Amino acid sequence: TEWLSTGRIDIGVVYNAPRLPSLLTEPLLEERLVLLGPANDPAGVGSGPVPAARLEDIPLILPARPHGLRLLIDRTLEKLGIVANVQLELDAMASTLGLVEAGAGYTILCDAAVRPLVKAGRIRSWPIDDPKMTRQLMLATSTQRPTSVATRVVAKLTRAQVSDLFSGERLVESVG
């Protein structure tokens, strides 16, 4: 986002882009966040949706602040008057998922990022409710540089790719 707002790059795909005069943003997809845990569920999360307030008791592995996902989780829980039970801060998603699979804790990510691991039975997934947590995937362009033909082509290809990858998912455009 910083590179976009300073004109260092022309286009990017970002989560929950801030409203800045230096950015033009377009929502691509609204993603639901889910709790992910070891297949044997050592914390006893059980089945069905997990109330967000339960995240106070479940040992979590989350990215460190100021990672956007962490800020979103912290803000959501702060409104409930609770603090996430963060046992380990780790920014690398692959490492986090490896630790979750090994039983070291639970994490929160979007469902699409981990669907193959869940389908293979390597980890479990629970929807988070009360409140539901979501984040927006956005196409962002810099206003600091003129929009080139190449930027417009990349934007068009990105929209098409997201649409193809998430066909059947809840695209922002279809609900807006």
Image (spheres, rainbow, N blue to C red):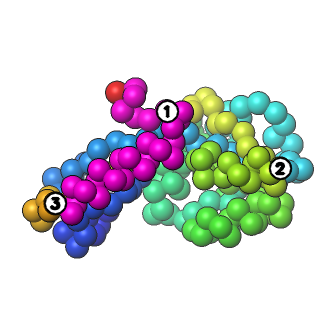
Please tell me which residue is depicted at 12% across the width and 65% down the height of the picture: 145
Which of the 4 image quadrants contains residue 127? top right
Secondary element at image label 1? loop
Image quarter of the N terminus: bottom left
- In this orientation, which residue lies closer to the viewer: 165 or 88? 165
Q: Amino acid at mark 3?
A: Val
For mark 1, does the 10 Å Cα neighbourhood hold few (<14), some (14 to 19), or many (20 or more) residues?
some
Q: Is disc 2 in contact with disc 3, using a CB cutoff of under 8 Å?
A: no
Q: Gap in Å between the C-alphas at discs 2 and 3?
A: 45 Å
When the figure is inspected, residue 5 is found, relative to residue 44, above or below; the finding is below
- Does residue 17 appear in this view? no
Q: Which residues are magenta?
A: 150-175
- 90 is within the stretch colored magenta: no
> What is the total number of numbered labels drawn onto the structure image?
3
- In this orientation, which residue lies closer to the viewer: 56 or 129? 129
Residue pushed farthest left?
146
Residue, disc 1: 170
Dominant SS type (magenta): helix
- Does residue 167 appear in this view? yes
- In this orientation, which residue lies closer to the viewer: 16 or 8? 8
- In this orientation, which residue lies closer to the viewer: 11 or 52? 11
Return the x and y of residue 56 as percentages of the image width and height. Answer: 69, 45
Please tell me which residue is depicted at 74% across the width and 54% down the height of the picture: 117
Badge number at residue 149: 3
Residue, disc 2: 121
Left or right: residue 153 versus residue 102 is left
When the figure is inspected, residue 163 is found, relative to residue 37, above or below; the finding is above
Q: Name the N-terminal-most of marks 2 and 3.
A: 2
Question: Of tags 2 and 3, which is closer to the observer?
Answer: 3
Q: Amino acid at mark 2?
A: Gly
Left or right: residue 45 versus residue 49 is right
